[in-house]
């Protein structure tokens, strides 16, 4: 269910783009992001910082796209979001000596070197995603970028998460029956 909540604005963006183009899709993504926050709030669920950050970035870059009628801004949104995620993990690790992923994955006990490796893997992945989005956004047609942003992004995230899960599975300790 959380997967659907997290990707709801993205899927609506895709459908609106196919139906009416980038400007309607951008407005729909902004409205869907506001709706996402409202639904989380009124359903009593926790609104994660990632939701607030995503809303702020879609409002800023999407708003600029709509006001200036320039699709360039919305194309930058994923790159900026991925870069901020990666930088947050990087700064948490290097500057503050924290493994921020450990805070997000409460209940999972891992040795510090494993948390560090996991953090660096996610920093690299977010860096890769930021560069990949930038490259596709500014070197391919708009339709190709939208397809990559939605289906390529979801696919790459799922593949990376499954790979991380396989690595983490080695450290899971099962309780005796």
Image (tube, rainbow, N blue to C red):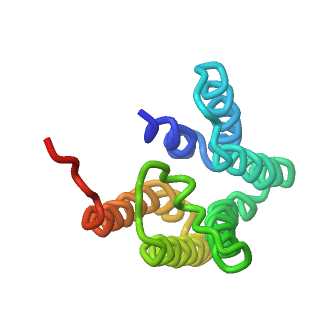
Is 137 on the left or on the right of 160, as rendered?
right
Q: Quadrant of residue 73?
A: bottom right
Q: Residue furthest top?
A: 42
Q: Residue furthest left?
A: 177
Is 101 on the left or on the right of 24, as rendered?
left
Residue 28 higher or lower than 148, as above or below? above
Residue 43: % across, % down? 58, 20
- From this viewpoint, is residue 140 visible? no
| Residue at image location 51% in from the left, 35% down from the top | 5
Residue 59 higher or lower than 132, as above or below? above
Q: Quadrant of residue 52?
A: top right
- For the C terminus, give its image quadrant: top left
Residue 141 higher or lower than 58, as above or below? below
Q: Nearer the viewer, residue 139 or 164?
A: 164
Q: Residue furthest front?
A: 176
Residue 50: % across, % down? 64, 50
Q: How many marks?
A: 0
């Amino acid at each position: 269910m959380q997967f659907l909540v997290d990707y709801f604005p993205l899927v609506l963006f895709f459908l609106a783009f196919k139906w009416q183009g980038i400007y309607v899709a951008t407005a729909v993504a902004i409205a869907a992001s506001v709706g996402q926050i409202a639904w989380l709030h009124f359903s009593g669920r926790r609104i994660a910082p990632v939701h607030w950050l995503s809303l702020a970035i879609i409002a800023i870059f999407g708003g600029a796209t709509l006001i200036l009628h320039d699709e360039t801004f919305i194309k930058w949104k994923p790159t900026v979001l991925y870069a901020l995620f990666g930088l947050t993990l990087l700064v948490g690790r290097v500057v503050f000596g924290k493994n921020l992923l450990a805070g997000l994955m409460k209940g999972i006990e891992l040795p510090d070197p494993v948390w560090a490796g996991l953090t660096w893997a996610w920093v690299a992945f977010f860096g890769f995603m930021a560069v990949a989005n930038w490259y596709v956004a500014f070197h391919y047609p708009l339709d190709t970028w939208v397809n990559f942003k939605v289906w390529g992004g979801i696919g790459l995230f799922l593949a990376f998460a499954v790979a991380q899960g396989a690595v983490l599975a080695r450290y899971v300790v099962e309780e005796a029956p």
